[in-house]
Image: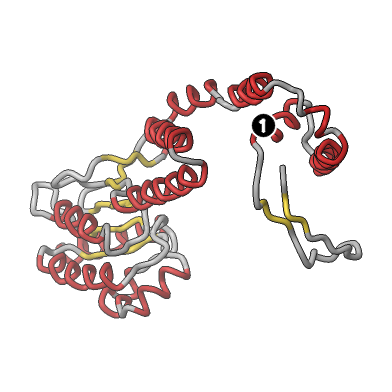
Amino acid sequence: MKTAILSVFQPPMQPPLSGTFVVNGSPTQTAMVEGSGGSSQLAQVSTAVVVACVLLFLTKPLQYLPRCVLGSIVFFIAVRLIDIKGLKDIRSESQGEFALALVTAAIVVFVGVEQGILVAMVLSLLRVVKHSYRPQTGVLVGGEHETWRLTPTDEGKVTEPGLAIYRFGASLFYANAGQFSQEARLIARPSPSKIRWLVVDAEAITNVDYTAARMLRQLQPYLLRQGVQLVFARVDASLQADLDRHRLLELIGSQFIFPRLYTALAAFAREEKSAAQVQR
């Protein structure tokens, strides 16, 4: 591996003042080092020294080496770089990543290594955006052994009578704010099992952007007209700061923002008990 190296000796326990970066590379030389068991920096340095010695003193004898022999050596080493077993493992676990690996490999073979790396980076970022754009959502219902089970957000879906816990699996931003609003309105629609509290499980919501904040400001009055109180549970300090910055704490009410899910459930139980006593 050909590298540009800058090194500065430092006393022990102090961070280095310089580093190294690859300016060019030889996959075949790398494969030869790995195939011989080299896994340390010393192995790379030794390889560089051997290559330098060959270039300085052995180029004349090597000129008589047939090019077909050299090509066969390079081809043999390059074929070993193809990890078929790794591709099979990726395919068995993730079809999307398998397709990404095939596209990247095809671009590397037919276009170039740099282009393949760039395309792989762009496609990987698009996959991340896609996951955030359509996050995993659902209504939490009680399962076996006092666990929660995530179910689809169907109309009238409840966690228990009068309560629906809505889990949203990503930060709230412009790309997924519409999905949040649509599913929240669907859950809050009048049905035989009418809910009074819509508790948002915000464990995965780390921040709220401007567009999502405007959506919440429109959603809150709609839910109140339906007789549904919007509640946030599992709210950490960063999310609470975001809600405060967008003036959502004032709109929703700080008494309906809970750091834990069980505290929100306990508050709902107290309110239901108080309402029952008033009706008597």
- Quadrant containing the N terminus is top right
Q: Which residue is mark 1?
A: 28
Of residues 164 and 1, which is closer to you in this image? 1
Compared across the picture, whether 110 is left or right of 79 comes to left
Q: Is residue 273 visible?
A: no
Q: Is residue 168 above or below residue 230?
A: above
Of residues 22 and 229, which is closer to you in this image? 22
Residue 190 lies, in percent from the top left, at 8, 54
Residue 145 lies, in percent from the top left, at 43, 34
Compared across the picture, whether 160 is left or right of 114 comes to left
Image quadrant assignment for residue 150? top left
Residue under the image location 88 percent in, 37 percent down: 57
The colouring scheme, among rainbow, by chain, secondary structure or one colour, is secondary structure
Image quadrant assignment for residue 16? bottom right
Which secondary structure lies at badge 1?
helix
Residue under the image location 34 percent in, 73 percent down: 255
Among all residues in the image, which is located at the extreme right? 11
Q: Is residue 195 visible?
A: yes
Residue under the image location 17 percent in, 62 percent down: 228
Residue 280 lies, in percent from the top left, at 16, 62
Compared across the picture, whether 55 is left or right of 262 comes to right
Q: Local crowd at mark 1 within 10 Å, few (<14), some, or many (≥20)? A: some
Q: Is residue 264 above or below residue 224?
A: above
Of residues 115 and 34, which is closer to you in this image? 115
Identity, as a three-letter code, of the amino acid under mark 1: Thr
Of residues 241 and 123, which is closer to you in this image? 123
Residue 188 lies, in percent from the top left, at 15, 56
Residue under the image location 46 percent in, 46 percent down: 115
